[in-house]
Amino acid sequence: MRITLDEIVEETKNWPPERVGELVDRLTEDLHASAPEIEAAWKTEINRRIEEIESGKVKGVPLEESLARARKIAGL
C-alpha cells in the first residue's frame, strides 16, 4: 500500500524538529550530492582559505561588518 504525500505531511507535523530535519536531509541528499572530483576541489579550496587565514595572509571580516556591507549594497 502506497502512502500519499498528504499522509506523510500529516504524519510528520507532530515530529520533533530534529527528526523532520533528518527526514529532509535524507530526502534531499541526492539533490546536493556532487561528483567526487568537485568535492575534492572544494576541500582543496577550503584548506587553502583556512591556511591563508591562519598564516595571516588574509584577514577575516567580522560578521556584523559583512552584514552592514551587504545591507548597504542592497539598499536596506
Image (cartoon, helix red, strand yellow):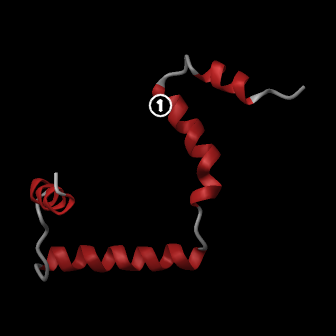
Check the image and name the residue furthest to the right.
1
The image position of residue 19, as x and y in percent, is: 53, 30
Toward which corner of the image does residue 72 lie, by quadrant? Answer: bottom left
Please name whichever residue, 12 or 50, is drawn nearer the observer in this view of the structure: 12
Please name whichever residue, 66 or 54, is drawn nearer the observer in this view of the structure: 66
The image position of residue 67, as x and y in percent, is: 16, 55
Q: Which residue is mark 1?
A: 18
Look at the image and tell me in which quarter the N terminus lies.
Answer: top right
What's the residue at 11%, 73% (across, down)? 59
Determine whether, in the image, residue 49 is placed left or right of residue 60.
Answer: right
Toward which corner of the image does residue 43 lie, by quadrant? Answer: bottom left
Determine whether, in the image, residue 6 is placed left or right of residue 51.
Answer: right
The image position of residue 69, as x and y in percent, is: 13, 62
What's the residue at 14%, 79% (across, down)? 58
Please name whichever residue, 71 or 54, is drawn nearer the observer in this view of the structure: 71
Check the image and name the residue furthest to the bottom.
57
The image position of residue 36, as x and y in percent, is: 59, 74
- What amino acid type should be assigned to the residue bearing mark 1? Glu
Toward which corner of the image does residue 73 lie, by quadrant? Answer: bottom left
What's the residue at 64%, 19% (across, down)? 10
What's the residue at 25%, 73% (across, down)? 50
Q: Residues within 10 Å of mark 1 (few under 14, many from 20)?
A: few
Check the image and name the residue furthest to the front.
75
Q: Secondary structure at mark 1?
A: helix
Determine whether, in the image, residue 38 is placed left or right of residue 48.
Answer: right
